[in-house]
Image: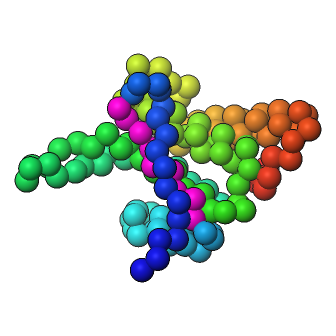
Amino acid sequence: MTKNYTKFKIFPKKYDKFYYDVCIFKDKVSMRKFSTELFPAMGKHRFEAATHSFKAYKTVKGKEQLSDMIGTVLFYKGGFGVGVVAHEIAHAANYYFVNRGDGISMVDKTDKDWLVNDENYALCIGYMNNQFWKKCGFKPGKERY
């Protein structure tokens, strides 16, 4: 079976061990299928990009232990620009700071409105990045704003 995505790691902080896997799929269908297989409880996924944060485990010498991977960020070729990337990275940073980082967060995970706050924060970061690059004369690519 051919691999239908490119994968690399990004780290929330320099010299930190925690990381996100970033996968850039050849097409939207492949990305959505991968996401649905990764998180079947979420049902069918209908998004243009996604950040999934979680606790991952690995087996070392026959024992299960917590992995340094704290999530995955998914895109597909031609389906994102600077604002969408910034938006998804904002989700990843929020999760990192609430669950793994220095206790710094723009939103409080114990707040009943965590998902709404997290999404609004990510929308703001993505939209501002999109405006910045447009005003610098760059074409930011496909955006969803």
Question: Most prominent secondary structure in the magenta stretch?
Answer: strand
Magenta stretch holds residue 15: no
Residue at image position (61%, 69%) is 26
Q: Is residue 145 visible?
A: yes
Residue at image position (71%, 35%) is 124
Closer-to-camera residue (64/17) = 17
Closer-to-camera residue (53/67) = 67
Q: Residue 76: horizontal and vertical position, in percent? A: 63, 62
Q: Residue 116: horizontal and vertical position, in percent? A: 58, 41
Is residue 51 shown above or below 126?
A: below
The answer to whether residue 123 is left or right of residue 73 is right
Q: Residue 25: horizontal and vertical position, in percent? A: 57, 65
Q: Is residue 114 visible?
A: no
Residue at image position (86%, 47%) is 139
User: Residue 69 falls in which quadrant of the image?
Assistant: top left
Residue at image position (77%, 34%) is 128
User: Residue 77 falls in which quadrant of the image?
Assistant: bottom right
Give the magenta-colored segment's residue range: 17-25
Is residue 9 shown above or below 30?
A: above
Residue sitting farthest toward the bottom: 1
The answer to whether residue 35 is left or right of residue 17 is right
